[in-house]
Image: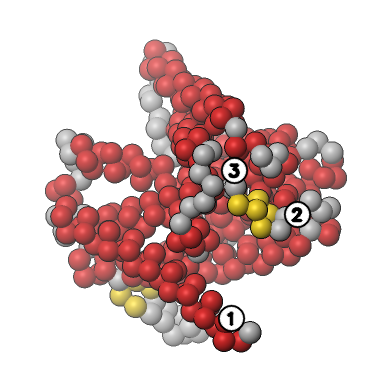
Amino acid sequence: MVTTGKKNRIIFIDLMRAFAVIQMVQGHTVDVLLAPALRTDENLAYSLWLFMRGMTAPIFMFTAGTTFTYLFRLAREPFEKNPRVLKGFKRVLLLIFIGYLLRYPTATLIDFSSVSEAQWRIFFAVDVLHLIGFGILFVLILAYLSEKTKFGDYVVFITAALIFFLPADAFQKISWTNYFPHPVASYFYSGTGSQFPLFPWAGYVVLGGGLGSYLAKNPMVFKSPKFSFTLSIIGFILLFISYIGGDLAVFFGYSLDRSSTSLLTISFRLGFVLLLNALISFISISVETIPRIIILVGRNTLLIYVVHLMILYGSAWNKGLNHFWGKSMYAPETISIALAMIVTMTTMVWVINKLRIRNKELVT
């Protein structure tokens, strides 16, 4: 552990953040470029990649909730005096704003006369940034309720996560556009084109917040193998529930549902995320420092997310690689470009950090 003032840097969180963003970059790159002929179940490499791609979003969201809540509770101030409250609300607005900006339907900013209905659907669809923005908002609200009700973070956060998880499958079957305007309905289900509606995805952020609160209240717990062991046990239990639940469903004649809203899938993904946290935390026990570039990559996830999406998918103001070479490349080219994208994003944050240091040195 490296201590700076009152803040304890938890190395395994830095590693998780960096791992999540690198997974996201390579996942998007491969998905944009890889030819359909290689996307088969017989292709073992593709099957492994597809599995990890399915885990990337839960890892990313869980880690975002863990990091924010850890820093929030580390301040050890009442909600009204906690400096992280204002920062949190600003972050919420920024994430939601950028989320919509990335999907902006026209390059003219104010002229919407040529925008089609399909473009409006894309604009109002809920993506990762919207979801994490609202996830942080829920964490702030839950932290406030926890303090006022005296129930404690663990009870409040786990209960809230279950509220997002349990009805997710039922919510997916409701036509929410019959009850709410399209932009609002997009937050409840994927029927409007949303990739990450609040149910169940906000539950991963909130549950990550529970771990973040635990780490802040037990500053040295992550240095003990017992912490990693406990995480792994909970992870294995969730995996077991997922598998035994699937077997029971088949035994009683029900169709096996492995969609993202299924409780079996949610349980499996949470189990995998906790096992990954357990593994990385165990590896980190004897590690006192890590290369600064890993910390920088984890700190600049928003910047990396925005830039790599604009390069790959484009925006209202530029055409991305998808426009020119979408789903047209074989494995060697795809892997090479994915590695180049990771190197480019890493170099970008390193250069920006260097420029900031230089600027500070010149000023002082």
Q: Position of residue 228 (x, y in %)?
A: 54, 31
Q: Residue at x 26, y 68 (%)?
A: 321
Viewer-side residue, 183 vs 50 = 50
Q: Position of residue 51 (x, y in %)?
A: 33, 39
Label 2 belongs to which residue? 75
Find the distance from the CA under tag 3 to the CA under tag 1: 35 Å
Q: Earlier in the sequence, mark 2 or mark 1?
A: 2
Q: Residue at x 73, y 41 (%)?
A: 217
Which corner quadrant holds the C terminus?
A: bottom right
Residue 360 numbered mark, or none:
1
- Would residue 298 be found to the left or right of residue 7 on screen? left
Residue 105 numbered mark, or none:
none
The answer to whether one can see residue 318 in this image is yes
- Would residue 17 be found to the left or right of residue 184 on screen? left
Residue density around tag 2, few if under 14, some if 14–19, many if 20 or more, within 10 Å: some
Find the distance from the CA under tag 2 to the CA under tag 3: 18 Å
Residue density around tag 1, few if under 14, some if 14–19, many if 20 or more, within 10 Å: few
Q: Are marks 2 and 3 in contact (CB under 8 Å)?
A: no
Q: Residue at x 28, y 54 (%)?
A: 31
Secondary structure under tag 2 reads: loop
Viewer-side residue, 239 vs 72 = 72
Query: Closer to the camera: disc 2 or disc 3?
Result: 2
- Quadrant of the rendered image containing residue 162: top right
Query: Closer to the camera: disc 3 or disc 1?
Result: 1
Label 3 belongs to which residue? 208
How is this picture coloured?
A: secondary structure
Q: Position of residue 105 (x, y in %)?
A: 43, 74
Vertical arrangement, residue 182 with respect to residue 354, above or below: above
Viewer-side residue, 167 vs 48 = 48
